[in-house]
Amino acid sequence: MLVSPVLTTSTAFGAFSVYRGVPAELTSGNAESFLQHLDGPTAFVLDGGLEKTRLVSCLVHGNEPSGLKAVARAFKGNPYSHHANMIYFVGNVRAAKAGLQPFSHRLLDNMGLSGPARDMNRIWAGHVPGGAQALVDSLLGVVHQFSMEACLDLHNTSGANPHFAVTLPDCIGSELIAGQLAPRVMKLSLESGLIGAMNMYCPSLVLECGKMGMKSADQIALRSLTHFLNDSLSLESRDITRYQVSAEVYIKKGLTMDFLGDTLEENHLSLSPQLEDLNFSALGQAVRIGRIDGDGSNGLPFVLSDHQAARQYFDWDDYGYIWLRPGYTLAMATLHQDNIRNSCLFYVLESQEANFGVPWSAA
C-alpha cells in the first residue's frame, strides 16, 4: 500500500492521484510490480527547487509498456534531473491491468465514454465528457504550477516501425528536441493528444519507441528517458528526416478484413501481409497494399481525415487490387485488427527531404 497521495480526483479512467516524490514501493525497477501498486492515472512530482520543469508521460495507451518499463528503471536508480524538476505521468493504468496478461488492452469500453473520448490520447483539447475532462483539468492543474521546459510522451506502435518522434506542425522547439532522440520526425496535427495540451506550456513530443513487446523498443525508451533526464536539451539543429502527415486512413464500417492480400469476398478487405514493411520505406513506385471485391464502383474502402479523397493517394485496378501512389510512404501500419478498429489503419506521409527517408530494418 502506497503512502497517501497529496491529491486524488475521480475521473472516467479511475482515481487520478498525485504524489510528491517516489514511494519506496515503486523502486523495484519492475514495471509489472510498479503497475500493481497503482489504481488509476497517477502523477509523481519531483520538485528539486529548480527553475524549469520537465514532464515524462507513459502508458497513455494501456498496451504500450516500453515507457513504463523505462520509468520503473529510472525510479529504481535516480529519477531526478540536474537540469529541471520532474513530473512523471502514468496514464491508462486500468487498461494496462485489465485481462489475463498486463499490457494487453489499449483502452477500455466500460468507462461511460464513447467515440474518441475512450482513448486517453484524444481528450486533451477539452470539451469531452465530464469524467474525461476531470483528468485533463487535474493533470494540467499540476502542470500549471510550474514553469515547463519540455514534455516527452513515450509510446509504442502495434506494428513494426523504426523509432520516430511526433510533433505538431510548425513547432520548431519540439522538433529540435525530437531530433536529439530520433532520426525521423513526423509532423501531425494532434491537438487532442497530450502533446497538444502540453504544447501550450513548452516544446512537446511523442516518441514512438518501436513495436510493443520488442526488447529493442524497451531499450530505446530507456535510452531516450535517460537522455531527457540528464541532457541540457540545447536547441541545436540535428540531421533528421522530416515527414508531413498527408492523411489519416481508416477502414470503412461494415467491412471484414484479413491479411492475406488476395482474398475476394463481398464487403471484405484483404490487406497485404507485408503491410508493416512499408512503414517509413522509400517508395519511388506504386506499391500494392491489398485487395477489395468489385470493380471500384463503390469507391475505395477507406475513410480519410478531413474528408479528403482517397483517390489522391490510392489507385484501384480492374482486379480490385489497391495501390499506394508513388511519392508516399506509410507510418504505423499494423496487422493488429483491434488496433485498427480502435485507432486508424495507417498514416500516409510525404517526406520533406530530397533523399526520401532514412533506411531502417525491422530485424
Image (spheres, rainbow, N blue to C red):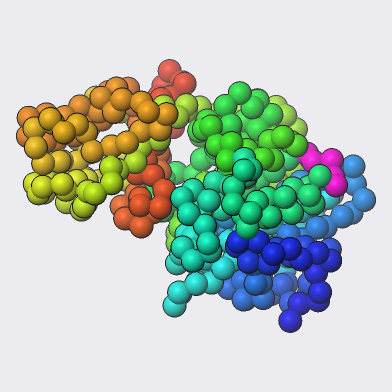
Query: 176 and 202: which one is in front?
Result: 202
Q: Looking at the picture, how far across and down is residue 6, in whole percent?
A: 84, 66
Most common SS among magenta residues: loop
What residue is drawn where x is 64% and y is 27%? 171
Query: Please, which residue is most extreme toward the top here?
Result: 354
Instruction: State which quadrant residue 152 falls in.
Output: top right
Query: 245 and 183: which one is in front?
Result: 245
Q: How many marks?
A: 0
The answer to whether residue 223 of the structure is visible from this angle is no
What residue is drawn where x is 67% and y is 55%? 135
Asked if the stretch drawn in magenta spans residue 217, the answer is no
What residue is drawn where x is 75% and y is 43%? 231
Residue 319 against residue 261 in the figure, above or below: above
Direction from residue 98 to residue 41 in the image, left or right: right
* Image quarter in which the N terminus is found: bottom right
Instruction: State which quadrant residue 20 falls in.
Output: bottom right
Direction from residue 142 to residue 91 in the image, left or right: left
Query: Please, which residue is most extreme toward the bottom here?
Result: 1
Query: 64 and 177: which one is in front?
Result: 64
Q: Looking at the picture, how far across and down is residue 91, in whole percent?
A: 62, 59
Direction from residue 38 to residue 144 in the image, left or right: right
Residue 142 against residue 68 in the figure, above or below: above
Q: Looking at the picture, how far across and down is residue 307, in whole percent?
A: 37, 28
Direction from residue 170 to residue 19 in the image, left or right: right
The answer to whether residue 149 of the structure is visible from this angle is yes
Q: Looking at the picture, how far across and down is residue 359, in whole percent?
A: 40, 35
Q: Which portion, as a residue range, is magenta?
A: 145-149
